[in-house]
Amino acid sequence: MQVADWHMTFIALAILNGITLLFVILLEETLPEAKRIQVGTIRSILGLFKVIKNPLFTSILLVGGIMTAPFMAYIAVASYVYVNGFHTSETMFSIYFALTSAFSVIGPLLYGRFGQKPFKKVFWISFSVALLAGSLLLSIGKINPILFLLSYLPFTVMSSYLRPNIANILLNAQKENIGAASSAMNFGFTILGSIGMFIGSLRWSDYISGIAITIFLFSISAMLIFMAANKLDIFNRIEAGKE
C-alpha cells in the first residue's frame, strides 16, 4: 500500500495471469494421440458426472474439502481481524499474512517427507488438530495478533498437509478420466472453500470467534460424513493406486 493503491493488486494479478497464459499456450500435449479422448467437449463435460457417481471419490472429496474449507474463511476475514480488530498497520498485516502463507508450505513438505499414510489415520489427526486450533482461537487468540497467528498456524499446516493426501487418493480412485477427476476435485474444493468464506464472514460478534466456529462446524460435518462413509465400508476400498 505504500508503493501503490489497491487497484494495483488486480493489475498485477492480470499481468501475471497473462504471462502464465502465454507459457501455457506454448506447452505441448504429452499424452500419446492414441490415448487421447476423441469425444467432443459436451461429452467430456458429461464425463464429470461419471466421476462424481463414484462413492469413494465423492466421499473423500467431501471429507477433505470440508476439513480444509475454513482456511478460506481465514483468508476472507484476516485483514479485518488484524487491521480493525488488533489495529495493526497494513504493513504488519501483510507480514502476519505472509507468515501464515509461509507455514502453509510445511504441509506439502511433510507429505513429501513421510509419503501417503492411511486415510483414516490422517483424518483423525487432522480432526484433532482442527479442534485444537479452534479451541486456541477462542481461548487465547483474541489477546493479541501474535497469539492469534500462533493459534491458527496448526490449522494452516494441517490443511496444507491434508490437501495432497486427498488429491492423491482421489486421482487413484479413478481408473480412467483422470482429467475429469482433477476438474471435479478442484471444483469441489473451490465450492466448499467459497462456502467457508461465506460462513466465516457472517456477522459474528467478532471474526476470531467466527473463524473458530467455522472450524468447529466444518470439522464436525466432515466427521459425520466420514463416519457415515466408514459405516458403509466405502473407505475400505482404498488401495495403493486403485479403487
Image (cartoon, rainbow, N blue to C red):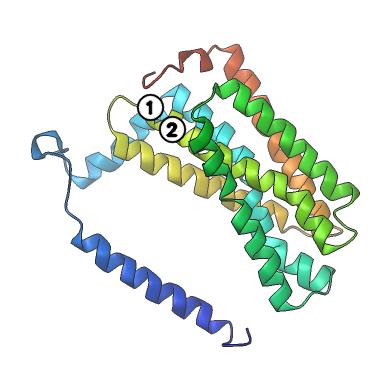
Task: Kindly identify the residue that appears in the image at 41 percent across and 74 percent down.
Answer: 14
Residue 161 in which image quadrant: top right
The answer to whether residue 232 is visible is yes
What kind of residue is marked 1? Asn
Tag 2, which secondary structure?
Answer: helix
- In the image, which disc is placed on residue 199? none
- In the image, which disc is placed on residue 168? 2
Query: In the figure, 91 relative to 36: above or below?
Result: below
Task: Kindly identify the residue that appears in the image at 65 percent across and 32 percent down.
Answer: 222
Residue 12 in which image quadrant: bottom left
60 relative to 92 in the view: left or right: left
Residue toward you, 117 or 52: 117
100 relative to 232 in the view: left or right: right
Work out which quarter of the rendered image holds the N terminus and state it: bottom right
Q: Position of residue 199 (x, y in %)?
A: 70, 52
Q: Residues within 10 Å of mark 2 (few under 14, many from 20)?
A: few
Residue marked by disc 1: 172
Q: Residues within 10 Å of mark 1 (few under 14, many from 20)?
A: some
Do the residues under discs 1 and 2 have CB atoms within 8 angstroms? yes
Tag 1, which secondary structure?
Answer: helix
